[in-house]
Amino acid sequence: MSPWKTLFRYIARQFFIWFSGVFLTMTAIVFMLDYVELIRRAGTKADVTLLVLLKLALLKQPYMAQQILPFAVLFGTMMVFWRLTRSHELVVARASGISAWQFVAPPLAGAFLIGVVSVTLFNPIASVTQARYETLQNRVLQGGNPQFALSSTGLWLRQSDTQGNPSIVHAERFTLPQRALHDVMFLFLAHDTRLERRIDAQQATLGSGVWTVRDGTDWSPDKQPQQFAEMEIPTNLTPAKIQDSFAPPETMSFWELPGFIRLLEASGFSSQRHQLYFDTLLARPLLLAAMVLIAASFSLRMQRAGGATLMIAVGIASGFLLYFLSDVVFALGLSATIPTLLAAWTPAGISWLVGVSLLLHLEDG
């Protein structure tokens, strides 16, 4: 085996060891903070036990672990190069003709592999646990039940009027600009179980606290069906509630998102939020690899630049800057100010440009 292959395996092993240590430490800290926050939120709910809150915190951790990955790669890589520099191993390797780009190659490949595995294998698991977390949290902390569902059979809504009487609405599609349901059916329930009335109509338009239903038929037990041209039905729904309360993209796996995006668009809803999240997942392997370049730029020569204190300070600053940039760009993409592709790939692209530029400037190459 060539010396370069031996060095590659050695640095790659060191990277995975340090990455795993940093990742597990950060995950444990986030878990404790989440658990404390859940205890605070449940302080006024006597029927919510600590065991239920522990289950909530555990269900949330896979999703939070995905958010931690870029920081774990950044800090883990910095620790690897800092240790190799302190022990003069990189000095010896450089004296033998190994360049900085060859030092970076093993963690770069490792970070890209972690990104691919996290998106294709870990993300489906995290989406299932996040969906269960959302359901359990809504039930025990918010006291509600899901009101909306979108499937291949159409749109299903659960609503209530000003007196709290429940009803279920089904429609083939919804046009958001006109706030209109098409081929709509209203099912009115008594005591949440018994059907007492049904209305079928061609269209229902959502106004301020009311559905305006046109060209329909009113069905009631022991009565003849009655045709009507227009009718108003009270509701507690708004367009924002309908749009925002579908399954969040975080609760859907990487493999399910394309189909759900097509379903949203076919049903007349905006798929901006889900498309942006899907594009962000696609960009994640490159983002993690870019974190390696930035970490290498700040840590390969830490011995000369001021030691561990400077490394930690620069690493923390870089992590917060990345987090801030990602949030800002994501918000711009979510509001359709910039295209979703640009919003998803900008953090990874900027990180690559910064990392490569710093390495070209600081290293001999």
Image (cartoon, helix red, strand yellow):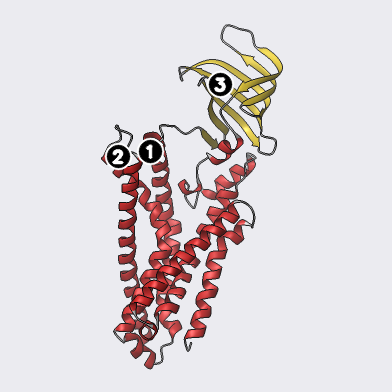
Q: Which is nearer the N-term, disc 3 or disc 2?
A: 2
Mark 2 residue element: helix
Mark 3 residue element: strand
Given residues 227 and 209, the one toward you in this image is 209
Q: How many residues crowd mark 2 within 10 Å: few (<14), some (14–19), many (20+)?
A: some
Query: From this viewpoint, which residue is outermost toward the top?
Result: 222
Given residues 117 and 313, the one toward you in this image is 313
Q: Is residue 200 left or right of residue 75?
A: right
Mark 1 residue element: helix
Circle 1 residue: 136
Circle 3 residue: 187
Q: Is residue 112 visible?
A: no
Circle 2 residue: 52
Tell me the kind of residue under disc 1.
Leu
Given residues 48 and 145, the one toward you in this image is 48
Q: Which residue is drawn at the image coordinates 50% and 58% (left, top)?
A: 281
Tell me the kind of residue under disc 2.
Val
Up/down of 8 relative to 237, above or below? below
x, y percent for residue 140? 36, 35
Q: Which is nearer the N-term, disc 1 or disc 3?
A: 1
Tell me the kind of residue under disc 3.
Leu
Q: Are marks 1 and 2 in contact (CB under 8 Å)?
A: yes
Q: Which residue is drawn at the image coordinates 62% and 19% (left, top)?
A: 199
The dot on residue 125 is: none
Q: CA distance from mark 1 to mark 3?
A: 27 Å
Q: How many residues crowd mark 1 within 10 Å: few (<14), some (14–19), many (20+)?
A: many
Depth check, mark 3 against mark 2: the one in front is: 2
